[in-house]
Amino acid sequence: MLIFVLKRVAWAILTLLIASWIAFVLVHLSGSTPGGVALGQSATPEQVVAYNESIGWYDPWIQQYLAWVGQVLRGNLGTSLIDGRPIGPDIAKRLPVTAALAAGGTILSAVLGIVLGVVAAVRRGGVDRFITVLTGVMLSLPAFWVGILLVYVFAVQLRLLPATGFVPFEVSPEKWFKSLVLPVLTIAITSAGFIARQTRASMAEALAQEHIRTLRAVGTPSGRIIYVHALRSASLPILATVAVQFIVLFGGSVMIELLFALPGIGQAMQSAVGSADLPFVQALVLVATLVVVIVNVVLETLNRTLDPKLRTS
Amino acid sequence: MTVSTTSILTIRRSERKRAHRLFRSPTAVLALIWLIGLVVASLTSPLWLRYGPLEQDLTAVLQGPSVAHLLGTDELGRDLLSRIVTAAASTLAIGCIPPIVAVLITVPVTLWAVRSARAEATMNRVSEIVMSLPGTVIILAFIAAVGTNMPLVMTLLGVLLFGALYRIFFGQAKALQKQLFIEAAAVDGVRPTAASFRHVLPNMSTTVIVQFVLFFGVGIMMQAGLAFIGLGPQPPEPTWGGMIQTAARFIFQQPWMMVPTGAVLALTIIAANSLADVLSGGAATPPPLVALRRRKKKPAPDAEYVVAVAPAGAGASLPAEATVLFPVETVADLPEVVATLPADNIETSAPDLTGRTPARTAADGELIIDDLVLGVDGGPALVTGVSLRVQPGRVMGLVGESGCGKSVTSYAILGLLSPGLSVRSGSIRWGRADLAQADERTLAKVRGHDIAFISQEPARALDPMFTIGWQLGAAVKRLRRVGARDAKSIAGQLLEDVGIVDVPRVLGSYPHQISGGMAQRVAIALALAGSPRLLVADEPTTALDVTIQAEILALLRGLVASRGMSIILVTHDLGVVADLCDDVSVMYAGQIVETGTVRDVLVRPEHPYTMALLAADPHAILDFDGTSRLASIPGQVPLPGSWTTGCRFAQRCRFARDECLTAIPLLPRAEGDGGVRCVRRDEVRGRQEEWRRPVAIGGGDL
């Protein structure tokens, strides 16, 4: 177990290094320079060069990269070129928003997807075909479009929920909840399809296993066979799909965050890219990779606990 | 099991099948029409559009659909139809970039990784890292660097998709590489590279195309998403995502705008995904092993029934006739055989000629299968008119080659048929219940409590996810209605009963941690959890080593002696029959061809098939004078659906004559109780030694 953990951690560090390297190279390949961005249109080329020199932009890449990594290791993610504020605290403020969105969306889509998938695998026939078509449409719909439709129905027409905006939990838990309902629902509708399809396939495979006949022969009720035994052996691939969904949402909720005006990581990424805020882009790539890596480690550990063959070997 | 040759043949035909599947599916045809139509409409748009995509009309902003503007206008009075159609061609073209790039990278890498272990290890690592990168964020960072150059951005998306694609391709390529024909190619001296291109790649083509189409959808979605957040092609150039973003801004003023803009995007992606679904053969999944619910029986089969006799049952041990139903047309000519057979004969069924026989109530602990017909729904029959009678405390062997219908018959007893198979007629009497027609509730009362089942492969018969103690405990709790603590001690006792020494360790083990013989003991303990009176054992020793086989047989023999249990033992091993059984029924091609006591059937076989089996049995060979040798039965068991009305064994029988082509009833044995299904019974009796000589198939008699 210890070797396993060490291996995973080494692996995670390697992935992070590669991501940081990609981020660094991309930023340095870009046409803009920190000086040009920070000083704006009005600055003369001399001022820009002077600014760039002051932060070591013309130093050898390897030196700059090591300097950056050294800074990050000391907990300093740099300062924004646009407003000059430190990036770290800004991201820390935004993380809970995206985390709530991704977690809520993942949980709801997992519940919806697993239910649909189990029903499709167990009932088969017409029900299965209907669910297959339904999930096919669900996973084809663009999330940002579904979001608009939901806004139109629940905010514009029914006036039940706010159309956009975010209220922090500390300010008002009720309003916080309301501001997340539509985004989370949007995610659930568009992500449940993948989970449902994976669940259906894994459940069907689980129900075709030889021990199902044994269970049936000792009089195990159908419900118990489906929900205790089959779902248990289907749980590993389903869990993997759910984890992938969470990862995709964490980095890819940009569209949802913009549509619903949620001040999360994705929104920050969009504005940083739009304004060429280079240190911010670098930092966000690193943070997003860190999340992916952590989720992967958690998933591996869960897999080991869920699968007796892995656990006992 | 080895790779079947049929799979090799079908793979070769994949291309034709693929085209066939595509054009026969209305969904796929519609999807193709939509995609091709969009491209054609877009490319020819200057010829037929009334407004240019950038043509503003500030007198007609934010309009709904009208004759002038079929899909309405945007906030600058630009025609939405024009903008949507104009944007289509470039969107679809750029959408092809990610799949092209991903496939171009992944296919060569996969073919390389499949051939060398070192390459495999490296590429697995690389793909894992690529998959661990946050795709959307990397793409956004890339846009920060190179700007909103869509072809370039989509190329990066293709590179990032490599991780996922490699997993899929590699899994399949590895399986293909292992297949027989690749190995054969290697033996033939084809160079590995050539083999990969000639054999692996063509057979992966369906997967490649399916993934291509799926990633095309991903490419379209990503373009729209980027345009939606303002990081796609910059205005005023029309983009689908950009138009949806505009629609979102004006949702309060003109909600209509989101309909055409979103629908065209959604429909395009739905089209791509449905194409992929159809191409991959619709997400085909294996059917469940056991039907989880029973379909309602169609009411009257084909004959009307009248209530004939109804004398209230007398003694418990007598087959008490409670309410007996006779089919109207057969009441008159009830088969004589029934009358002539001794009362406690194993075989009481009517011959196939006359059809149905009277149903009856089985005595306590007795199982009576009567004229059971099983078949594939909408397909051939698998078992035709099997009748068996298992008395309390007796062991009935059911023997025959593979494919004779033995296992299916044993599954039917507890309603454990796979979906798609069903009982067509006949009855399985247990007490007052007819298990062939019983509903789930009745079966649930019988399963485990009265009749238990153990299956062929002990290693796979137990749920790998739970400990043995947990599984056994759960069954005991339910079947004996006891608490968790009692269940645990009973479970331990059961394991001791089946001869397990280290009970606490086994209770805490998972099925993969114990040996096959141990697993079979556990499976038997599980079957005993509800103290059943009848055990149906489907080839319980086939998958085990010979030494373990003997132990399991001894265990079963002990159970019969100590618990007075009866057993139906399905096997192809006559040695096992001789060892354990009291009675035996020999099955051939869905029929019982000979029944009787073990001594009668094995020592004085009357059916040529039984003789042939005995001659072919490796245990039974007694080579005292060095002349006899192990015989083989020429030919194969005829497949269900190809059975003739005459003797089904005739094709392979050395004694067959023309008279064997007529329908043959199960006649009483010449010696002893039981029946035999052979018209030449009296001529062939006692000639089993002849089966040890090579045979001229199909009637080389004398």
Image: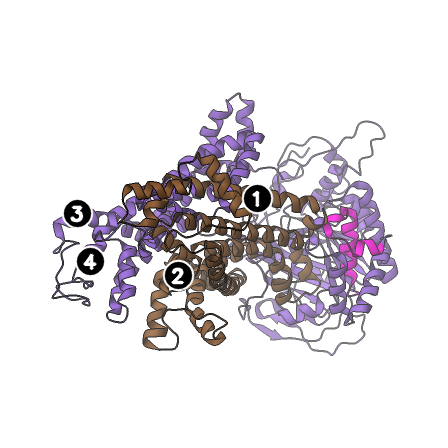
The secondary structure that dominates the magenta segment is: helix
For marks 3 and 4, the one nearer the N-term is 3
Disc 3: CA contacts within 10 A as few (<14), some (14-19) or many (>=20): some
- Of badges 1 and 4, nearer the viewer stands 1
Circle 3 or circle 2, nearest the eye: 2
Mark 4–mark 2 Cα distance, whole angstroms, equals 26 Å
Residue matched to label 3: B44
Q: Name which residue type carries label 2.
A: Ile
Q: In whole angstroms, how far apart are the C-alphas of marks 3 and 4?
A: 14 Å
Q: Say which quadrant the N terminus of chain B sits in.
A: top right
Numbered disc in front, either 4 or 2: 2
Which segment is the magenta one?
B503-531
* Foreground label between 2 and 1: 1
State the hue of chain A.
Answer: brown
The answer for how far apart the CA atoms under marks 1 and 4 are is 50 Å
Badge number at residue B114: none
